[in-house]
Amino acid sequence: MKIVSIDQMRDLETRADRELGLSSRVLMENAGRSAADLFRNWAGDLKDKNAVLLVGPGNNGGDGLVIARHLKNWGMRVTLYLWKEGQVVLGGVGGLAIPVRDDLKHLRLALASADFVFDAILGTGRSRPLDPTMREALALVREERERRSDLRVVAVDLPTGVNADTGEADEGAIPADLTVALANPKLGLFFFPGAALVGDLLVGDIGLPSGMDASIRLEMMTDALVRDMLPARPLESNKGTFGKVMVLAGSPPYPGSAYLAGTAAGRVGAGLITLAVGPEMLPIYSEKLSEATFALLPAESAPPEERASTFLRALDGYRTLVMGPGLGHSDAKRALVTNVLAGLRAMPDDKRPRLLVDADGLNNLATLERWWELLPKESILTPHPGEMGRLCGGQHISGGGADRLEVALAKAREWGQIVVLKGACTIIAAPDGRARINWRGNPVLATAGTGDVLAGTIGGLLAQGMLPYEATSAGVFLHSRAGNIASETLGDAGLLAGDLPPLLPLALKQIKARSSS
């Protein structure tokens, strides 16, 4: 599902009119019906429920009026708050209409008995502060929801006051329980603070032909998209069918990292997991992860060149190398990393495993000039914002702002690598300009070690023959879905990273079972 900017959405609508004769009135009718249908499926039985619709002056308000007509036909009691003086109400809506000149007394009374409030005041065109009367109306909704927790707010296309390109939010904007984006989700829905106001996100159909947005290179991750990527599991398979993953991770201060990455790789279906370990770590891992095999390295105190050469000899036949989680950050570890990378570059293309670099692998590289030239092309880099900042020479990278997309795309192109910029809405960027955004963040994953699990998840999918961009996208989505499964039981806190790998098969099963997204 493509994610669009304001200009891209306007271009799609203009083309629909010019090339296909789909006027704005037709698109509005389609949008309102689709949004109403999605809302009904989300909300359940609507008969005798009360809906208040805040109707703005433009197309967003027009969409709201179409929604109102369908709600009334389904047995709801509908009240319209018409923001624009002299606003025309489309035929068939009926119900009470409260004009903007009202002192808001009647709106306050209508909200007191409302089950649902629809925010259809402003859509993608908003780029300036809200009119004071809009803020006043939205403030009444906020007050009523603070009084009654069962009141539900539905935003049409996006919450009023959220910038559709940047996610900036006016101080008067209120959070929605459901946002029904129309035609395509807008950029601003994925960046904070706006992303925190979206609630559940569904996407309505306005009647644009399939493929009309094909030239747009930014996608939202969905079940349907990921389902089509996942590798087959043929009956006549064996462990070699699903590939071998080598994990170069962990160190005495961080013994859990290799375990977490290796376990995740196995839980998403890789055929064989091997941990590269020295004698200091072998007793820990052999006890903790009995399903793994081990590539025995010289002791941590041995010269890094010796450790690297031993490791490289063990790599034959592996499809994937996950390097970096918990490895440690020092001159010796940096030398180990650079020697391993030199060995990888010297391998024939058909013998070289796909490479994922995470955590301390990235931190060691970030100290080197033009470090990206040490990597095979289309390696996978999985930095969090702090690590990304170090890779970019000390640049500040936000955890959820609109700057993240621009940075991820620019650096993926410059470095020739796939960049996974982790955060509340993780971004996957490819060197050719494609990008995907994972919807949505989950605070249950904000705990130490979940990044190691993500690295192993992606590595396990790579081992099964997936291409790097697809394996990375699917890995991010599965990792997030496993977090969602955890939060259904735990809430938004209390997950330990080790709880996550056993949920990955459930996430796979859930995604494969869903017929639509």
Image (cartoon, grey):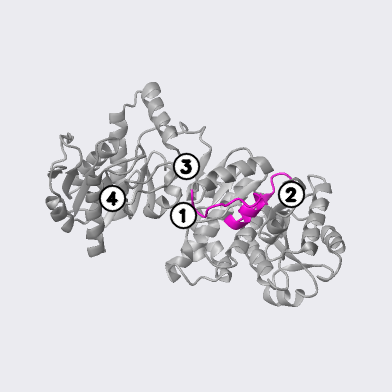
Q: Is residue 129 left or right of residue 108?
A: right
Which residue type carries mark 2? Trp
First in sequence: mark 3 vs mark 4: 3
Q: Please name the amino acid that badge 1 sits on.
A: Arg
Q: Which residue is mark 1?
A: 440
Q: Between label 3 and label 2, give the one nearer the viewer.
A: 2
- Horizontal and vertical percent position of residue 163: 39, 43
- Against 167, is 237 above or below? below
Q: Is residue 414 visible?
A: yes
Q: Is 388 included in the stretch rendered in magenta?
A: yes
Place residue 125 in its image quadrant: top left
At a point 77% along the width and 58% down the height, the residue shown is 337
Q: Residues within 10 Å of mark 3 (few under 14, many from 20)?
A: some
Q: Secondary structure at mark 3?
A: loop
Q: Position of residue 157 (x, y in %)?
A: 34, 43
User: Nearer the N terminus, badge 2 or badge 4?
Assistant: 4
Mark 2 or mark 1: which comes first in sequence?
A: 2
